[in-house]
Image (cartoon, grey):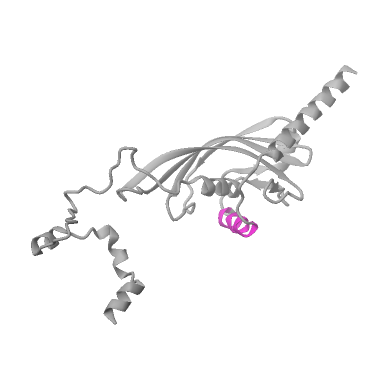
Amino acid sequence: MVGLNCKETHCRNLKRRIVKIKKRPKVRLSSTIRTNLSKDNSASTDLVIDIPSLFRNAGSFEPVECQWSPSEIVTSYSSAKALVGVLNVEALTEKITVSGSIDIHWIGPCRRCLEEAKGITQIFIQEIFEHNAAEGETFEFPSGEKLDLKPMLTEQTLLSLPLAPLCSDTCEGPIDTEFPIDISQNQTSDSKQINKKDPRWEALDVLKFDDDQDHSA
């Protein structure tokens, strides 16, 4: 009876953990993007879990060290250079849970001075892989004998990369003496020479607005 009660208690605890994870609100990428991520990362054997071996030790965590340098986790604002951390993978009844923390080492242009900015963003992973996964809640259980963690990590990284990187909290933007600007209304030929164009903004010169077209007409 004591052994049976312990088993029932263990099952109840597992159910509570699953419910707790499912109730956490999530932001997800579309299923189309997920499919493309799976294809992009399918060639590598890093961070791939053997499912039969995992279920032979059901109920116990298998630590997985992450030392991954992805090449294509890039947004318009920043890119991931390395993912470092430890994940705990556990097999439950027809489910696999993945938990842990990952440090995202990223680079991107500073939003103020446009020089290269670097930083580390820590994310916490708590995911479930199951059959008939709930959209936006869990991930689909693999059809084969291998579980590739890279698509899941790629998704979480894309959602966590900074949208407006900053090289330093004290960054004041471009150096005034390098690209001086004379904003006085009475500009002379000398002041026009002072207004040296910043080459980082040359792409904006090709923009044409309706007011410019009206004046030219």
Q: Position of residue 33 (x, y in %)?
A: 59, 58
Q: Position of residue 43 (x, y in %)?
A: 57, 54
Q: Position of residue 186 (x, y in %)?
A: 13, 61
Residue 166 figure quarter:
top left
Above or below: residue 54 compared with residue 182: above
Above or below: residue 67 compared with residue 174: above
Residue at 71% in and 34% down: 20
Residue occupying the far right of the picture: 1
Q: Position of residue 127 (x, y in %)?
A: 65, 41
**Quadrant, the N terminus:** top right
Disc tally is 0
Side of 102 relative to 167 (left or right): right
Residue at 19% in and 56% down: 183
Residue at 86% in and 20% down: 3
Residue 202 figure quarter:
bottom left
Above or below: residue 113 compared with residue 22: below
Magenta segment? 31-41
Instruction: Pick the residue in front: 68 or 190.
Output: 190
